[in-house]
Image (cartoon, helix red, strand yellow):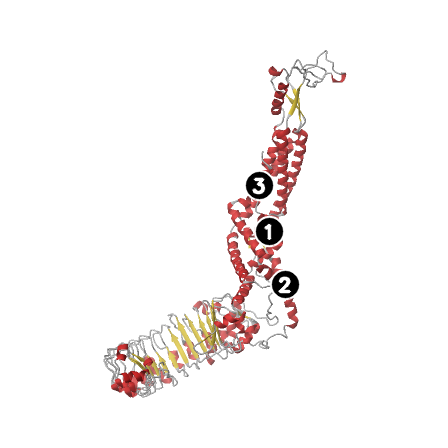
């Protein structure tokens, strides 16, 4: 027989699973234990005391001494063993001719023949039924495909419940509610001085498409309040909480895709209900079969001499009481099963809403869940709803962002940020933050910062504290759709002068960018294809009344017509394409104030005619296009202010003589083309100060170069020049002379006439020596002399000494 401990082990589950057992499961478990005890108690008594006692039914005789009231009935004899004869007598002394062994034989025979089977096997049936019910109750905890999910859920739920972040997040929610009520009375007095008092100026309007798309909103009557931390979250707890957010996210994705746990629980409940009905039906039929008296006909008359016996079952009374108790327990068990089914089908358990949690906390973004995830949360609610409430904290992105913010501020202190501040090329203090979860609060304590670069920070927020950074004039947002508070926007609108925005899709451009009325320079770098051009919202740029420089690096096929909204006050327009052909340029005609124009890598094959209408144009850069001919250059004579023309990195074969009409040119860049000669017309440009024809196929420097008396920078590196004309050295104002990678065999001594020369490049030629007169170039130093080492070593020592001395003297080696 089973012991109670052995059978009870079937009902064992991990203690942590108790949170998934509602009250009815717990109650049914106790009922199952009581039924087990009934089965074991009945079975134990049956093994130790269960037996029947049988006596033969005697035929009545004439001479019997029966009492008058007993005539016609069977006489029950008592067994009296005579001492000497070994015979049995009845109460009247009548002999039965049965000895003790025969009585034992009859008792055993009649136990199996006369006793109903239900009386004999009742304890075992109860035990089997109870085991089946216990297995049915806990099968969902043991089935492999559900067990793993349940274990994972219970583990995560326990960690979420005990996590310090859960307590902190819920505490701060309560704190925020109280602080918000207090600040409503004093908020207007505590606003920084940069809050805009105008009602409409610089505010988003319904006509701004980007604002509508991005959902950007300002709240003038509810300023953002800095809520002090209620508790301190150390780094270890923060990392643990971050891991929990990731685990919950992955678990949700894994469990929400099926409803296996729900179906299995419903199935095992149905099985228990069917089992209850079955037990109740057949037990009711057998309850009356358990009786104290039984008639037995063993058919062993030839052995005993009697055909009928009347037997008594000594356990009948106890078994009947136990059976009634068992039926009562089964009825209670069955009613609970019916209630469970009612609960399972009464509400949609495959959907779970955190609406109440959202109302009670600041985490209004906690999503509703479905399928097995929802069912598990419904089961937990039957244990304690506080578990679901605390668990919901780890489903909220707002909560996760708050955690990141706290961890970020803990890691990036003011001292650490100060160490990352550097000086840029313009000698300005610059801070570059890369791939952080947000912007640390300590950044806004760097009040002397000039440039702030934020790169790959998806959750960047600019609070009101930025109003402390009075020196900040330049901001970089690289794949960083930053959000700003109302006060912060007011400050940026009044103080920001330069903004760089790099994006993948135009939707990443923050809407408030178009409202920075005092912005001077705007750099947009990203994808602006024809479809997105409709969404770019450049008509909003009309609010940028002081914008002077617009730099667009993208893949435009045409200049957006709406860009003309800012044309009246633009002085510089830069369009860098990625090789996409720029076809429509008519909008350029309206930009009459543009002084600098760059159209780079736009696949232009000719100089656009629209450019000839820009009467104020001073510098034109058409770098990296496919221009082959520049016959239209004659039209530049109408651009009286044009001083710099950059046609480098194209496919130009020759320079037309009409270039002589562009008399005001001071800089001409024709490097990286296919020129084979320089026409004399180039050297009629008397104002030319810089001429760059590097990396072409020019074999000869014309002697007319001596006419360029104002020439200061001459670059002819990477050509086929073999002789330097003496007239070159009449350009006494030359400061930079680049002659590298040619076929020059000697440098004339007249190089000494270039008294202002600071940079001389001769590397990559066929020289065997350098002229000693180099020492007479007063401003030339070794750092500005680019030659092979052996040529420099071959110079006289006094020349080398002159070139080596006082290398700290500044010199102009650039353009």
Up/down of 44 relative to 266, above or below: above
- Judge from the rendering whether residue 185 lies leftward or rightward of residue 16; answer left or right: right
Q: In the rendering, which numbered label is found on residue 174?
A: 2
Up/down of 592 relative to 232, above or below: below
Q: Badge 1 local density, few (<14 within 10 Å), some, or many (20+)?
A: many
- Say which of 521 and 91 sits in front: 91
- Judge from the rendering whether residue 218 lies leftward or rightward of residue 653; answer left or right: right
Q: Pointer 1: what residue?
A: 380
Mark 1: secondary structure: helix
Mark 3: secondary structure: helix
- Say which of 617 and 207 sits in front: 617
- Separation of residues labelled 3 and 2 (CA atoms): 45 Å
- Separation of residues labelled 3 and 1 (CA atoms): 24 Å
Residue 225 place in picture, x, y as percent: 60, 69
Q: Badge 3 local density, few (<14 within 10 Å), some, or many (20+)?
A: few
Mark 2: secondary structure: helix
Q: Earlier in the sequence, mark 2 or mark 1?
A: 2
Q: Earlier in the sequence, mark 3 or mark 1?
A: 3
Residue at 50%, 65% (x, y): give it.
437
In which quadrant will I find the N terminus?
top right
> Which numbered mark, 3 or 2, is in the foreground of this view?
3
Tally the marks.
3
- Judge from the rendering whether residue 676 lies leftward or rightward of residue 357; answer left or right: left
Q: Pointer 3: what residue?
A: 9
Q: In the rendering, which numbered label is found on residue 626?
A: none
């Amino acid at each position: 027989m089973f012991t109670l401990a052995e059978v009870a082990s079937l009902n064992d589950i991990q203690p942590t699973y108790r949170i998934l057992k509602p009250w009815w499961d717990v109650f049914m478990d106790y009922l199952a234990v009581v039924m087990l005890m009934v089965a074991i108690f009945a079975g134990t008594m049956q093994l130790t005391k269960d037996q029947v006692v049988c006596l033969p039914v005697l035929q009545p005789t004439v001479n019997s001494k029966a009492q008058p009231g007993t005539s016609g009935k069977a006489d029950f004899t008592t067994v009296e063993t005579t001492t000497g004869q070994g015979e049995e007598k009845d109460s009247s002394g009548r002999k039965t001719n049965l000895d003790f062994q025969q009585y034992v034989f009859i008792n055993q025979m009649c136990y199996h023949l006369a006793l109903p089977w239900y009386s004999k096997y009742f304890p075992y049936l109860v035990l089997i039924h109870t085991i089946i019910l216990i297995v049915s109750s806990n099968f969902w905890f043991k089935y492999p495909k559900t067990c793993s999910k349940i274990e994972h859920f219970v583990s995560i739920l326990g960690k979420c419940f005990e996590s310090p972040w859960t307590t902190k997040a819920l505490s701060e929610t309560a704190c925020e509610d109280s602080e918000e009520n207090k600040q409503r009375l004093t908020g207007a007095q505590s606003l920084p001085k940069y809050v805009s008092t105008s009602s409409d100026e610089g505010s988003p309007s319904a006509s701004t498409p980007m604002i509508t798309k991005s959902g950007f909103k300002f709240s003038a009557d509810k300023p953002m309040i800095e809520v002090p931390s209620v508790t301190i979250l150390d780094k270890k707890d923060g990392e643990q909480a971050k891991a929990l957010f990731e685990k919950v996210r992955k678990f949700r994705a894994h469990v929400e895709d099926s409803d296996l746990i729900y179906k299995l629980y419903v199935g095992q409940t149905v099985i228990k209900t069917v089992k209850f009905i079955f037990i109740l039906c057949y037990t009711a039929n057998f309850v009356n079969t358990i009786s104290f008296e039984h008639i037995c006909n063993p058919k062993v008359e030839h052995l005993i001499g009697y055909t009928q016996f009347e037997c008594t079952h000594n356990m009948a009374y106890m078994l009947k009481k136990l059976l009634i108790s068992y039926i009562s327990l089964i009825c209670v068990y069955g009613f609970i099963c019916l209630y469970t089914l009612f609960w399972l089908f009464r509400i949609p358990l495959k959907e779970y809403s955190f609406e109440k949690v959202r109302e009670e906390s600041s985490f209004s973004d906690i999503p509703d869940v479905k399928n097995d995830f929802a069912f598990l949360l419904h089961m937990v609610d039957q244990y304690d709803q506080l578990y679901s409430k605390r668990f919901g904290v780890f489903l909220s992105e707002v909560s996760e962002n708050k955690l990141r913010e706290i961890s970020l501020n803990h890691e990036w202190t003011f001292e650490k940020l100060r160490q990352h501040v550097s000086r840029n090329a313009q000698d300005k203090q610059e801070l570059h933050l890369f791939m952080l979860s947000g912007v640390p609060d300590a950044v806004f304590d760097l009040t002397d910062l000039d440039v702030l670069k934020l790169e790959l920070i998806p959750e960047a927020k600019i609070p009101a504290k930025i109003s402390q950074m009075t020196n900040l004039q330049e901001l970089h947002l690289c794949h960083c759709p930053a959000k700003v508070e109302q006060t912060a926007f007011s400050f940026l609108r009044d103080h920001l002068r330069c903004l760089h925005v790099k994006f993948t899709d135009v939707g990443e451009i923050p809407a408030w960018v178009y409202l920075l009325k005092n912005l001077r320079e705007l750099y947009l770098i990203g994808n602006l294809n024809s479809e997105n051009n409709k969404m770019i919202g450049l008509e909003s740029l009309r609010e940028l009344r002081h914008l002077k420089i617009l730099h667009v690096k993208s893949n435009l096929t045409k200049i957006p017509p709406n860009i003309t909204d800012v044309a009246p006050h633009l002085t510089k327009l830069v369009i860098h394409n990625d090789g996409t052909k720029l076809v429509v340029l008519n909008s350029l005609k309206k930009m009459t104030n543009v002084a600098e124009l760059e159209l780079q890598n736009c696949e232009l094959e000719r100089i656009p005619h629209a450019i000839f209408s820009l009467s104020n144009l001073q510098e034109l850069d058409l770098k990296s296009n496919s221009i082959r001919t520049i016959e239209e250059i004659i039209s530049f004579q109408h651009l009286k202010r044009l001083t710099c023309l950059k046609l480098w990195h194209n496919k130009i074969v020759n320079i037309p003589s009409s270039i002589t009409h562009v008399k005001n040119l001071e800089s001409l860049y024709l490097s990286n083309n296919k020129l084979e000669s320089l026409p004399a017309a180039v050297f009629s440009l008397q104002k030319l100060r810089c001429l760059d024809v590097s990396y072409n196929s020019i074999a000869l420097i014309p002697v007319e170069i001596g006419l360029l008396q104002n020439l200061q920078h001459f670059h002819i590196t990477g050509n086929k020049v073999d002789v330097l004309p003496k007239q070159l050295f009449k350009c006494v104002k030359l400061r930079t002379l680049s002659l590298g990678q040619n076929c020059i065999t000697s440098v004339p001594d007249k190089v000494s006439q270039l008294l202002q020369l600071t940079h001389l490049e001769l590397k990559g030629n066929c020289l065997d020596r350098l002229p000693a007169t180099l020492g007479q170039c007063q401003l030339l130093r070794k750092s500005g002399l680019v030659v092979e080492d052996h040529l420099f070593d071959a110079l006289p020592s006094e020349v080398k000494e002159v070139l080596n001395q006082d290398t700290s003297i500044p010199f102009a080696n650039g353009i």
